[in-house]
Amino acid sequence: MVAPAPVSALLHAVAVVKAGAFGMVRLVYDVFGLERGQALGVLLPLAVVAAVTIVWGSFRALFQDDLKKRLAYSTVSQVSYIILGTAILGPLSTVGGLVHLVHQGLMKITLFFCAGNLAETLGVHAVSEMKGAGKRMPLTMAAFTVGALFASLGGAIYSLQVGLITPTLVGVVASVEMVIYAAVGGRTSVVGAVAGALLVGFARSLISENFAQVWLFFVGGLFIFVVLFLPNGLAGLPGQIVARRRARTDP
């Protein structure tokens, strides 16, 4: 991503990327049509490719330290949601994809402009260099936070209540559980976060089925325990044990 921030924002939020997604919607509905598309069997492969691209783009974004590259790979994943909604051939999924086409463009242009402001003002080009940026540029980082929040949760916020995804699924309890997943597994390790999600999910299914009212208290106690005794989560536990052994053996 060597283009200036305004050009990157234009390409990702308005011009090339969104034009391609809108063109795919018109291709499915106006060129092939619903019945012809189903008869030719082209919609299922399109949905599979879109689903794979969603996961691939998200994982590539996680491992990018360059801020603009992370936003670019995030755009790849987000646009694939629009294609997936079109390939499902449901009225609600298509409407959701078109709404996501608009709102994701607004949020992504905000994120790219914030990234450009950080680069020009503070010389920050990487995610690892953003420490302390909130204190030095509070308005820019506030806009960046709002843009990142709505870019990730916008689909759930704008979904119809008759669908499977509603804002209740991203409420306080679910948000706290996501934080605990990362805290238990390890905040600095993707593998640790996945392990934490598996362990906490297994504990939830085991405890909530038999003791439904105890689950929330267990979650709170687990979070306090991890913060006090496992600051780096399970992923940092081996290093913590090794450090304690070295401290005991050193004179």
Image (cartoon, helix red, strand yellow):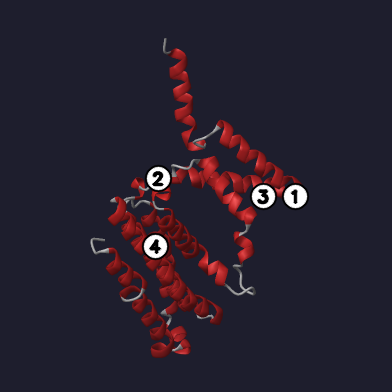
**What residue type is disc 3 on?**
Ser
Q: Earlier in the sequence, mark 4 or mark 3?
A: 4
Gap in angstroms between the C-alphas marked 2 and 3: 39 Å
Assess whether mark 4 and mark 1 are in contact (beta carbons under 8 angstroms).
no
Give me the residue at 57% from left, 72% from top.
159
138 sits left or right of 64 in the view: right
Question: Percent from the top left, x then y, of residue 224?
Answer: 62, 37
**What residue type is disc 1 on?**
Ala
Q: Label 3, on which residue?
A: 205
Assess whether mark 3 and mark 2 are in contact (beta carbons under 8 angstroms).
no
Question: Percent from the top left, x then y, of residue 194?
Answer: 50, 47
Q: Label 4, on which residue?
A: 111
Q: Secondary structure at mark 1?
A: helix
**What residue type is disc 2 on?**
Gly
Assess whether mark 3 and mark 4 are in contact (beta carbons under 8 angstroms).
no
**Eye-nearest disc, 1 or 4:** 4
123 sits left or right of 80 in the view: left
Q: Is residue 80 visible?
A: no
Question: Percent from the top left, x then y, of residue 183?
Answer: 54, 42
**Eye-nearest disc, 2 or 1:** 2
Give me the residue at 63% from left, 39% from top.
222
Q: Earlier in the sequence, mark 1 or mark 3?
A: 3
**Eye-nearest disc, 2 or 3:** 2
**What residue type is disc 4 on?**
Leu
Give me the residue at 54% from left, 44% from top.
196
Q: Earlier in the sequence, mark 2 or mark 3?
A: 2
The disc placed on residue 132 is: 2
The disc placed on residue 212 is: 1
**Eye-nearest disc, 4 or 2:** 2
